Image (cartoon, rainbow, N blue to C red):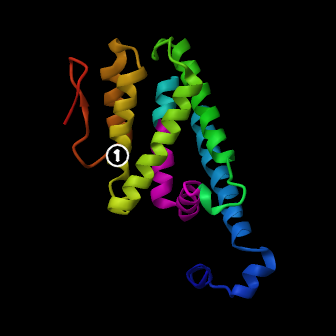
Amino acid sequence: MKDFTRNAGVTTGAVYFHFANKEAIALTIIDEYNKRTQRDAEEILQQHLPAMETILLTIAKFTRAILKDPIVQAGARLTSQPLVFDNPPVLPWTAWSTVHVQNLTRAIQEGDVKPEIDVDRYASYAIGTYAGVFIFSGLLNGLNDLLERVSDLSIILISSYVVPEKQAYWAQRALEICDATQPPLQLSTSGRLER
C-alpha cells in the first residue's frame, strides 16, 4: 500500500476514503483493465478483418497493453492470482473466452480453422495458456520476452487448429503482427515447429 500511495501521490487516508479495503482497490483496477482491453478488442473487431487476423491483432494489442499500460498490467496480474480474492473476478476471463469463441466460429465459417474443433474448449484452453505464458514470462524475465513467448504461442496454436493449407500463411502473419525480436518458432513445410 505504501508503494501504491507514494506512486499515486496520495495519502493512505485519501485512498481509504474512496475504497473500503485493498480488495476494493484491486477490483476497481480489474474493472478498468477489463474495460480497456475489451474496448481495444472491439476496435479491432470493427475493422471487419478476417477472423484469424482479428485474433492475432487482438492478442498482440493485449500483449502490448500489458507491457505499456500500468492499469492493464496490474489487472492482468491481479486476475492471474484468484486465490487472493474471497470471490475471484471471473468477468475478464469469461469476456475474453467469449471474444475468442466468436472469432474462432467466424474463422471456421471463413475456412481458416478446422470445422471439427470444439470452439468453447479451445477458447478456454487458449486463454488459460496465454495466462500461463504471461505468468511464466513475468517470473523468469520480468515480461521482457512476453512478445516472443506470445509469438511462439500463436504459432503453436495455429499449428493445432488452422487448416493445414493455411497454417504457413497465418504463422507468418503471427510473426509479422507480434514483431518479436527473438528468433521465433517457425512452422516448417512438413508442419513441424522449429527455431
Residue 135 occupies which quadrant of the picture? Answer: bottom left
In the figure, 34 relative to 94: above or below? below
Quadrant holding the C terminus = top left
Is 88 in front, or is 113? 88
Residue 149: where, in percent of width, then height?
34, 46
Residue 102 occupies which quadrant of the picture? Answer: top right
Q: Amino acid at mark 1?
A: Arg
Residue drawn at point x = 44 percent, y = 51 percent = 134
- Visible residue check, residue 149: yes
Q: Is residue 47 left or right of residue 150?
A: right
Residue drawn at point x = 70 percent, y = 67 percent = 23
- Visible residue check, residue 46: no
Residue 123: where, in percent of width, then height?
54, 31
Residue 144 occupies which quadrant of the picture? Answer: bottom left
Q: Dot 1 corresponds to which residue?
A: 149
In the figure, 161 relative to 92: above or below? above
Mark 1: secondary structure? helix
Residue drawn at point x = 62 percent, y = 43 percent = 93
Quadrant holding the N terminus = bottom right
Residue drawn at point x = 49 percent, y = 47 percent = 131
Q: Is residue 30 left or right of residue 115?
A: right
Report the magenta residues as a range: 57-81
In the figure, 108 relative to 23: above or below? above
Residue 143: where, in percent of width, then height?
38, 58
61 in magenta? yes
26 in magenta? no
